[in-house]
Image (cartoon, coloured by chain):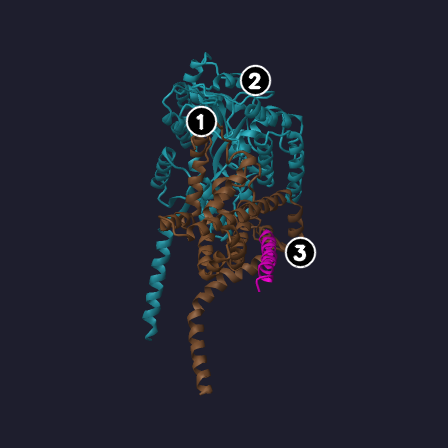
Amino acid sequence: MSRRPLILVLILVLAFGLSATAGAATTIHYWHYLSGDYAEIHEAMVEEFNALHPDIQVELLYTGNQFVTRDKLIAAVAAGQPPHVCLVDQFWPPLMVATGALVPLKNFVDTDSYFADFNQISLDTVTVEGEIWTMPFSLSNQILFYNKDKFREVGLDPEKPPATWEELLEYAKLLTRDLDGDGRIDEWGVNFTTRANMGAVYTFITFLWQAGGRIYNEDFSAAAFNDEAAVETVQFWRDLAHRHKVLNLSPPQEGFETGRIAMQIASTSSIEATKRKVNFDLGIAPLPSYRQKVTGVGGSSLAIFKTTPQEEAAAWTFVQWMSSPENNLKWSTLTGYTPLRKSVLASPEYQSYLAENPAVQVVIEQFQYARARPNEVSYADVSRILGVAVEEAVFGNLDPKPILDNAVAEANTYIEMSK
Amino acid sequence: MRAKRSNLGNEQTRTALLALLPSFVIFCVFTLYPVFHSLYLSFFNVSLISSSRSFVGWNNYAALIKNPTFQKAVLNTVIYTLGVVPVGIMLSLFAAVLLNNKLKFRGLFRTAFFTPVVTSMVAVAIVWSWMLEPNYGLINSLLSKIGIAGPGWLTDPKWALPSVILLSIWKNLGYNMVIFLAGLQDIPRDIYESADIDGATPVQRFIYITLPLLRGPLGFAAIVSVIKSMQVFGQIYVMTGGGPANSTMVIVYYLYQQAFEFYRLGYASAVAWVLFAAIFVLTLLQNRLFRAEGA
């Protein structure tokens, strides 16, 4: 008899509790690594999503730069506590797929029809073993920044940036100068990342592709970066540094921004930041090319991690919204990143944005020959080995052929292991 | 009386054990267990990112010995150790003998030599990276004043490892110096006085008195320096990242890269145990060397 009220109370509490749960918003933890101006634009988008979706609450968490975020994400995945959604860099998807913690997007939607509006290159970056794993979010590629003032000083036409490797070398020779006559070079013609541990491979493979070379063979069963084209590419870098001395292997920090380097290969994602830093007439051009026109692709996508069906569904709603036509248009025009969707690229709003920003026009034109890095599980190892080999030949001023042969042999052991 | 004493001893022992328990538990959880777990892992193909693991026996060790990057790391570690230890010990012994004399500003000099030892390695490595910077750096600016075009200290594969060796010698100089100073002050003055009466030169005094009587501190310094050098990591991580072209790739950096960039925990554990075995054998050998004649 005395028990009965207690049970009644319990039932009441439970009933209230359950109804409260049903009414509460699903919380989505979202990790990202964006900073600066982009972060504010990005944050505003997330806030807008939250305002429009009362049943989903996205909690945005800045987890440090790319490298720090990757470490935290791996630790979280290993501990079985990943966030619901994480912004991932372009070359992480194979690694993330290997963890088994990702939800493939085919679980939510028929990917063929859903992604029909997305351009092929954005899908290439998120496809691993034939399946789409993450939602493309931003897309960049490599371009040539140049200092128009320096071009004028040495008598080059500032409106005619170098279009070929040959012109790149020729211009760089003119732009490399010893200004005070002390026998030491004060200004260098060209610069790009040459250190393996700072991502030189990203630049190198673009040169390699331009020369007609490749990293893997046709069926990705072995490494193939020791053919004639690869040797020629390494030799070109080696000559820039040692024979012509137009590329400084220990470049001054922020050398381009401070006017000590006249041309620099970098990502389109640094256009806005570079514009703010320089006080000279900045030129932006497509990459100089060789046998083929190619540029490398960078960017990021949104990964959904395995949680509960309800949370996964909420996460899917969120990532769809982030790359919806309206938001992709907004993101592209506010940041300079390339549109992911064909419909956005063709929209009158985006076309008028291009008309106002001729520099971005360059990026878009170049996009038709952009190429994504291979999404192979062995790519992390293979690219490290390739990077170190290039470094060895270029920094050691050595014959590239035997070094590349050895590197291919070493890379093959990792490719075999990954199969 | 005897019984009472042992009782007291027991009680004291119990209290001591109780007091030691917390730190012992922490030691077990965070040191002892990981050490043996890493030995266990070294026989598995285990990745940080996937839950599957498979027993591979000695395969990790076999792959390791054959791996060209690991071979390079071993070679670089040996060169580094040979570069840092003998030169470092000679210099610090020299500094200790000098500063054992009554000099003006002796305290100031001793402090100056010891300051790098207590400074954080990361801070020191960043400062040195700037001094060694080829375009604006202090060292190349000074060299250019006397007409020498300095190399890219940390970006030229020929100079990168020597540059790191230089930093390490400088950083550790004070530590060995303090040990030698303590050793020097233990040598009785009357031995030197009788040598003076016999007409010994300063060089003879150093060779026949100072060196033999410093055998203990010398042995200690050598053993500790070799262990520290074999485990070099911080300055490599900050200054060169193992590059360029693996010219500063050392064993612990290789281990770090395999474990935390490529997530191969089993393989990295094998690296750790090979390094441990090498250091263990080296320490035994040195111990014997410095004890044999001294005893």
* Left or right: residue A56 compared with residue A107: left
Do marks 2 and 3 share a chain?
no
Q: Give x and y (percent) for residue A59.
A: 38, 45
Q: Quadrant of residue A206?
A: top right
| Label 2 neighbour load within 10 Å: few <14, some 14-19, many 20+ | few
Q: Residues within 10 Å of mark 3 (few under 14, many from 20)?
A: few
Q: Which residue is mark 2?
A: A166
The spot of residue A345 in percent (x, y) is 46, 24
Residue A323, compared with residue A22, is above or below; it is above
Circle nearer the viewer, 1 or 3: 3
**Magenta residues, start to end:** B270-295
Q: CA distance from mark 1 to mark 3?
A: 55 Å
Name the residue tied to disc 1: A344
Tell me the amino acid under the disc marked 2: Glu
Chain letter corresponding to the colour cyan = A
Q: Position of residue B241 (x, y in %)?
A: 51, 41
Label 3 is placed on what type of residue? Gly
B286, B17: nearer the viewer:
B286
For the residues labelled 2 and 3, say whether their Cβ atoms are less than 8 Å apart.
no
Task: Give the residue number, with chain letter if any, for mark 3.
Answer: B57
Q: Is residue B278 magenta?
A: yes
Quarter of the image where one finds residue A413? top right
Query: Badge 3 sits on which subunit?
Result: B
Task: Give the letter of the brown chain.
Answer: B
Is residue A218 visible to the viewer in this orientation of the structure? no
Instruction: Please identify the quadrant where the C terminus of chain A is shown.
Output: top right
